[in-house]
Image (cartoon, coloured by chain):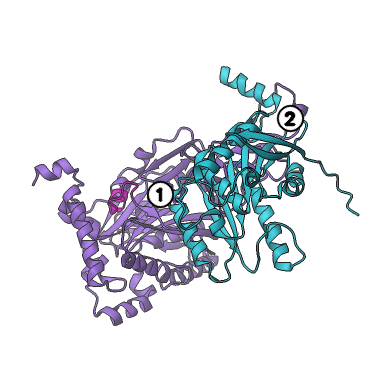
């Protein structure tokens, strides 16, 4: 029997340029350590908020999950359109008192393009994309993104490219062009949603590793929200 | 007279007492008088390519965090939580904006500021939150970053004295805006011997042919007889503050390593010519030569065999040291030159290469035989004292080191040796572009 206490996400909408983006939010009391904006796969809003929102909560992050695909067709959407929508969501999270560097953006599947674009457009603390195919996040014919916030990309290794040469070449290219730290990796022998747990051993191992990397990526880079006493101390030192 | 150094100018003879290599009291005195007082190398700025890049190192027995902070400034922090002491960063290399102690969760930025401490209400509002501790002084010279644990130390520039010119000869080898860069990858090995034995070995020309016999057999088999001027046409220089260099003419550089293709030779030649236009032909003639430089006490820069090795020697006990080695290169060089450079770095300087294992074996046998120091108390480092013109095969460079060491440990000041002035091909100055143009 599952006896783990889970927080039920509250559902809502963020209006942006006439479109309504469905969101699911897991808020925390006290002084949370940071905020996560999750971009779910289309139709996976509640499942993502429930599974990953609760996991992030265990580590002091409150979260807002958004389903961009429910607001507009992600495939074929222009980067500007996705970036603007993610910007509106960051602003929405900011209304709870989070500055951009206190926010990590995590995108799953095709919405992983959104977190890569966020890393190139906003001064967020960190960004992560997890997707089955590199093309979901960095299509070959799409404009190259130059992350200015640290970005982690995780993909399933393409069976037609067993050495992972395409992913490796992409990793070298994005690291060379970005002024900040980036990491790209591919998991062998996994399929689509490797970031979700599975009984299949390779998928299980990949989902565990992917979650650990996501959490550590954020822990090392997302600025913690200062407590009341920390604020007071900073102000005292600034005045001195 | 010092009980460690016998500097007899009448015979002449220079000897070092082997207790200096074995006695725990000497080791403790070195920590206090040398490693707590001298400028010590931490790393090269190019190792920290991006904001929040971090390397962890040991300097003078202290664990340090060598980092580039979020704003791009190079920082060195003591790798210990101000709370209860646990190491903040346990990775050799990483990238992180925040370092959170895994013991109680106190968190600090790469700029050294405290960021958070769990349960801070229990400390009260007047609690003074500590930032990360750091060495008393941090400074760099052309990308080489040093620290000093003595707040009253002289500036790095003054400390480096004449060694700056020889670092310039290395650093000027790149035309790129960022200068020479450390290539990824580190040689790390340990030696069961006193650290000063590796300092001596690092610029000891005398040992090369005997200790590295097989290497020279390989070179002569591949390239024909050696040009002996590479051994004879060399000089040694006391650079002040214990630093010294043994330096050779271009014959030394072109005799070693694997032969280059015509295209790689042309690339190298064209680069030297462009540098000559900027800094003068004489400076580039010196640059084409070789140099084994020791910056007192434990930084070695060897520009020899198709590459530049940066070596940091860390003593951990009287009879044990750890050694780190990196390759310094012009980032703009082409693939063949880079391949040759890395090949030599691995096959000559590497822990399993043609040179380092020979040296390690020699030093470890020295250390083992020092157990008989009662019967055989002194080591001899006199070679070249009676010569007017000493070469790299002589031992002036080691005597320079030992005289400084002796001064810092015992307070006894021994006068420098006087030898004939250096020839012009070892002294040509570095011109700036304007001077170079005006002198035609």
- Which stretch did the figure color magenta? B166-179
The residue positioned farthest toward the bottom in the image shown: B221
Chain A as rendered: colour: cyan
Q: Quadrant of the N terminus of chain A?
A: bottom right
Q: Residue at x 42, y 63 (%)?
A: B379
Label 2 secondary element: helix
Q: Residue A111 appears at what percent x and percent y?
A: 61, 49
The residue positioned farthest toward the top in the image shown: A239
The residue that disc 1 covers is: B296
Q: Quadrant of the C terminus of chain A?
A: top right
Q: Compared with residue B19, is residue B251 higher up or lower down, i.e. above or below?
A: below
On whether residue B190 falls in the magenta region, the answer is no
Q: CA distance from mark 2 to mark 1?
A: 45 Å
Chain identifier of the residue bearing label 2 in the image: B
**In this rendering, position of residue B1 left or right of residue B91:** left
Q: Residue B392 appears at what percent x and percent y?
A: 29, 62
Name the disc covering residue B120, or none. Answer: 2
Q: Residue at x 15, y 53 (%)?
A: B281
């Amino acid at each position: 029997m599952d006896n783990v206490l889970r927080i039920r996400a509250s559902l809502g909408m963020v209006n942006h340029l006439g479109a309504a983006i469905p969101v699911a939010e897991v808020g925390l009391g006290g002084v949370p350590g940071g905020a996560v904006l999750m971009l779910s796969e289309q139709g996976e809003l509640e499942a993502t908020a429930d599974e990953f929102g609760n996991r992030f909560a265990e580590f002091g992050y409150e979260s807002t999950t958004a389903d961009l695909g429910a607001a507009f067709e992600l495939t074929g959407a222009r980067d500007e359109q996705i970036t603007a929508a993610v910007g509106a969501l960051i602003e929405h999270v900011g209304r709870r008192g989070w500055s951009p560097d206190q926010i990590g953006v995590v995108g799953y599947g095709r919405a992983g393009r959104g977190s890569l674009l966020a890393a190139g457009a906003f001064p967020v603390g960190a960004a992560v994309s997890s997707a089955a195919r590199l093309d979901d996040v960095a299509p070959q014919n799409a404009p190259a993104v130059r992350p200015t916030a640290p970005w982690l990309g995780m993909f399933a290794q393409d069976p037609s490219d067993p050495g992972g040469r395409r992913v490796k070449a992409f990793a070298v290219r994005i690291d060379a062009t970005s002024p900040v730290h980036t990491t790209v990796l591919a998991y062998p022998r996994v399929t689509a949603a490797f970031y979700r747990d599975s009984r299949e051993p390779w998928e299980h191992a990949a989902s565990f590793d992917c979650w650990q990397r996501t959490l550590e990526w954020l822990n090392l880079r997302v600025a913690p929200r200062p407590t009341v006493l920390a604020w007071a101390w900073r102000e005292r030192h600034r005045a001195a | 007279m010092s009980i460690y150094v016998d500097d007899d100018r009448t015979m002449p003879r220079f000897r070092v007492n082997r207790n200096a290599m074995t006695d725990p009291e000497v080791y403790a005195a070195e920590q206090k008088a040398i490693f707590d007082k001298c400028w010590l190398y931490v790393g090269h700025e190019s190792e920290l390519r991006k904001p929040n890049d971090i390397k962890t190192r040991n300097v003078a027995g202290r664990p340090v965090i060598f980092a580039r902070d979020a704003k791009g400034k190079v920082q060195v922090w003591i790798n210990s939580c101000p709370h209860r002491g646990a190491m903040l960063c346990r990775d050799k290399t990483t990238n992180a904006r925040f370092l959170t102690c895994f013991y109680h969760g106190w968190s600090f930025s790469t700029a050294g500021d405290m960021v958070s401490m769990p349960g801070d209400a229990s400390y009260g509002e007047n609690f003074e939150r500590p930032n990360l501790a750091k060495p008393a002084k941090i400074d760099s010279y052309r990308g080489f970053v040093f620290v000093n644990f003595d707040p009253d130390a002289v500036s790095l520039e003054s400390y480096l004295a004449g060694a700056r010119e020889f670092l310039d000869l290395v650093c000027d080898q790149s035309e790129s805006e960022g200068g020479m860069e450390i290539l990824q990858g580190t040689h790390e090995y340990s030696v069961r011997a006193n650290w000063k034995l590796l300092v001596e070995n690092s610029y000891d020309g005398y040992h090369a042919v005997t200790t590295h016999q097989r290497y020279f057999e390989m070179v002569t088999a591949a390239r024909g007889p050696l040009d002996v001027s590479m051994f004879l046409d060399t000089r040694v220089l006391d650079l002040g503050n214990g630093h010294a260099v043994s330096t050779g003419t271009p014959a030394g550089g072109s005799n070693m390593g694997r032969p280059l293709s015509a295209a790689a030779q042309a690339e190298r030649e064209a680069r030297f010519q462009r540098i000559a236009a900027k800094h003068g032909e004489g400076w580039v003639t010196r640059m084409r030569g070789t140099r084994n430089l020791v910056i007192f006490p434990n930084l070695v820069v060897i520009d020899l065999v198709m590459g530049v090795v940066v070596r940091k020697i860390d003593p951990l006990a009287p009879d044990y040291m750890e050694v780190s080695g990196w390759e310094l290169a012009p980032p703009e060089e082409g693939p063949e030159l880079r391949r040759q450079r890395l090949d030599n770095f691995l096959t000559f300087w590497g822990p399993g290469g043609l040179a380092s294992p020979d040296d390690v074996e020699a030093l470890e046998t020295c250390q083992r035989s020092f157990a008989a120091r009662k019967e055989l108390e002194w080591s001899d480092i006199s070679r070249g004292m009676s010569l007017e013109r000493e070469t790299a095969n002589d031992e002036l460079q080691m005597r320079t080191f030992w005289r400084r060491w002796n001064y810092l440990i015992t307070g006894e000041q021994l006068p420098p040796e006087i030898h004939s002035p250096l020839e012009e091909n070892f002294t040509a100055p570095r011109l700036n572009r304007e001077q170079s143009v005006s002198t035609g």
